[in-house]
Amino acid sequence: MADGAEAGRDIMIGVLCLDTSFTKIPGHIRNPTTFGFPVTYKVVEGATPERVVSQADPRLLEPFVHAAQELQARGAAAITGACGFLVLFQERLAAAVEVPLYASSLIQLPMVHRMLRPDQKVGLLVAKESSLTRRHLAAIGGEHVPICVAGMAEQPEFREVMLEGRRVELDADRLEREVLGQVDRLARDNPDMGALVIECTDLVPFAHAIQARIGVPVFDIVTLTEMVYRSLTRRPFGRPGAA
């Protein structure tokens, strides 16, 4: 029987992707260098940020179901999503496949809340604050979690590249400044924020800089994917007296 390390070489994570063409830098879930294990991608044609984030278009459910089933057929041992707003489809997508499926980093929200003191909030860094509704939170049982939210929709680099698709080339330094500016404001206005969950996968490359700036635990789609992968590749622990 193969041990966990050997078996892990055969484990692959599938990623449901939006229809975008901008540069995916290291740390982004769609950059394979982000992970130390195999990933496979499926772009859902027509699933633009406008339709997923701004419109919450229910007509996209069926294409995402088909894409998840294709990833399972390719051999994905678990499936995730490249946009936190896919949380609206979580229940239906998970029901459509035979492998674990976690459509959004927001799934971590109730867990993170339980880790904190009762008087603390969970911060959310999202693509578009006005698009985050109670329905999104209820999809993962987080509608009663005390949160504080910062959005990126009004930041020029993020809006032009990620939301509107005006350019393919990303100015990562400019985007980082925008991200840190929003995070600084969120932390300043909410001194009771005990942790941060990054909804938007496009912002995960800056998680290290965010944590260095505000000094709280930071969760995102990469932390979740790494946890799921580890749950699928367990290995035996050494025993006292074993060689």
Image (tube, grey):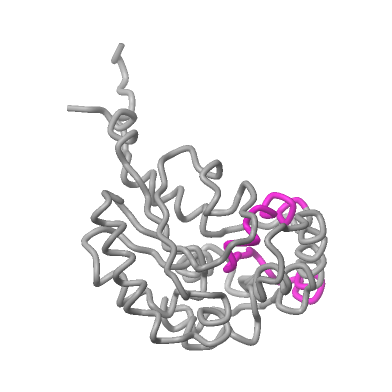
Of 208 and 113, the residue lying toward us: 208
Q: Is residue 188 visible?
A: yes
Residue at (75, 75) in percent of width and height: 190
Q: Position of residue 221 (x, y in %)?
A: 51, 59
Q: Quadrant of residue 127?
A: bottom right
Q: Position of residue 70 (x, y in %)?
A: 28, 60
- Does the stretch in magenta take in 201? yes
The answer to whether residue 37 is above or below residue 174 is above
Of 218 and 6, the residue lying toward us: 6
Q: Locate the C terminus and report the quarter of the image it occupies.
A: top left
The answer to whether residue 229 is above or below residue 154 is above
Q: Locate the N terminus and report the quarter of the image it occupies.
A: top left
Residue at (65, 79) in percent of width and height: 128
* Identity of the residue furthest to the top in this view: 243
33 vs 149, left or right, is left
Q: Position of residue 75 (x, y in %)?
A: 26, 49
Residue at (50, 68) in percent of width and height: 18
Q: Quadrant of residue 81?
A: bottom left
Q: Which residues are magenta?
A: 186-212
Of 76 and 126, the residue lying toward us: 76
Q: Position of residue 125 (x, y in %)?
A: 65, 70
